[in-house]
Image (cartoon, helix red, strand yellow):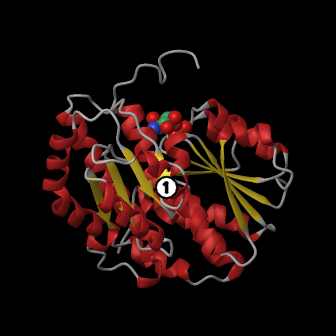
Amino acid sequence: MVYEGPFAQANEQLERVFDAYRSRTIKRVFYVACGGSSALMYPSKYVIDREAQGITAEIFSSNEFIHRNPRSLDEQSLVILCSHKGKTPETTEAARFAKSKGALTVSLMYVEHAPLADESDFVVNYSWISAGNMEPHPEIMNYAILYRLTMGLLYIKEGNKKYEKLLASLDHLGTVFEKAMVQYADTVREYAEQYKDESIIYTMASGANYGMAYSFAICILMEMQWIHSHAIHAGEFFHGPFEILDKTVPFILLKGLDETRPLEERAHAFLQQYGEKTIVIDAKTFDLTGIDDEVKGYIAPLAMNFVLRMFALALSKARSHPLETRRYMFKVPY
Ligand SMILES: N[C@@H]1[C@@H](O)[C@H](O)[C@@H](COP(=O)(O)O)O[C@@H]1O
């Protein structure tokens, strides 16, 4: 495949980060961001947990990162931050804080110039498109860039060969999305018509998919649709939340291809027995041709997220509530 334009630019930016990886010791990764930008880091932490021999990873909401002030944050830390427009003040502050501790700071953003860029050692720009639309550069979308940064680290520091398999697989992500778009077109429309008047919709997942359930609950349903929601971990479901279940309570359950799928299957069996308003998005239904078997569990959440964003757009149309409508965000002081 011949790459140019945004891909070439992102690649150059990534190569500069990789040179920095090579020039220093990195023992731990802190993923730091807010809201949707934080949710997108969950699959990368899952990859580190599963794959790294000696490197550890944590996820922090930007403000908590500063106030909690982890003792292990030092010059052997890599802090990966993300802010879509690079303007969220607590994320910019977190970058400044991380640098003051000697950490290597790498920030992802959609825009080229922003306050966060000024406070970071390195910036990588990702490609983005609004929910429900075909991603023009899937191989450099936010999740893909994060995976490159994460698997690239494990490749450089620990010789993890899955990096090459990931890169080869990302080349096929666009085709995976195109097929999913056709496959789920009717489902999302029907779902939106059936559920458009619900006042609450829970989401549930585990492992690499939990971040998708989290962002759908807080960013799509709550922020963009003003529908009550909560992302429930499929394992935690049995330790409180399942008491809320009856035949009137809507759930969206994600079933991925990673090692935690048994947790999602257990939750599914219970939802089938006691619930009625359940929709399951199962990654086994996706056509993942071109995705290497060894990274399918890691790529599935990206396809899941793509499909969830189709649900978001369909719901917003059925409810005549545009995804851009806000009461408070960016409108009042907070
Ligand atoms: N859904 C997200 C929010 O969760 C986030 O708070 C906001 C600013 O975030 P960012 O720092 O990514 O620009 O953007 C989006 O609207």
Along the line of sight, which residue is nearer the eye, 186 or 165?
186
Q: Residue at x 25, y 35 (%)?
A: 316
Along the line of sight, which residue is nearer the eye, 149 or 305?
305
Along the line of sight, which residue is nearer the eye, 98 or 182?
182
Residue 119: where, in percent of width, then height? Answer: 70, 40
**The N terminus lies in which quarter of the figure?**
bottom left
Residue 145: where, in percent of width, then height? Answer: 51, 60
**Residue that numbered label 1 is attached to:** 237
Along the line of sight, which residue is nearer the eye, 219 or 142?
219
The answer to whether any part of residue 132 appears in the image is: no
The three-letter code of the residue at mark 1 reads Phe
Left or right: 30 in relation to 88: right
Residue 4: where, in percent of width, then height? Answer: 39, 62
**The C terminus lies in which quarter of the figure?**
top right
Q: How many marks?
A: 1
* Secondary structure under the numbered disc 1 in the rendered image: helix
Residue 10: where, in percent of width, then height? Answer: 50, 58
The vertical placement of 187 against 199, above or below, is: below
Of all residues shown, which one is farthest toward the top? Answer: 332
Left or right: 229 in relation to 95: left
Q: Residues within 10 Å of mark 1 (few under 14, many from 20)?
A: many
The vertical placement of 214 against 298, above or below, is: above
Q: Residue at x 80, y 66 (%)?
A: 24
The vertical placement of 294 against 178, above or below, is: below
Q: Residue at x 34, y 50 (%)?
A: 251
Q: Quadrant of residue 282 in the image?
A: bottom left
Left or right: 104 in relation to 112: right
Q: Residue at x 62, y 41 (%)?
A: 117
Mark 1 residue CB less than 8 A from any atom of ligand 1: no
The answer to whether any part of residue 280 appears in the image is: yes
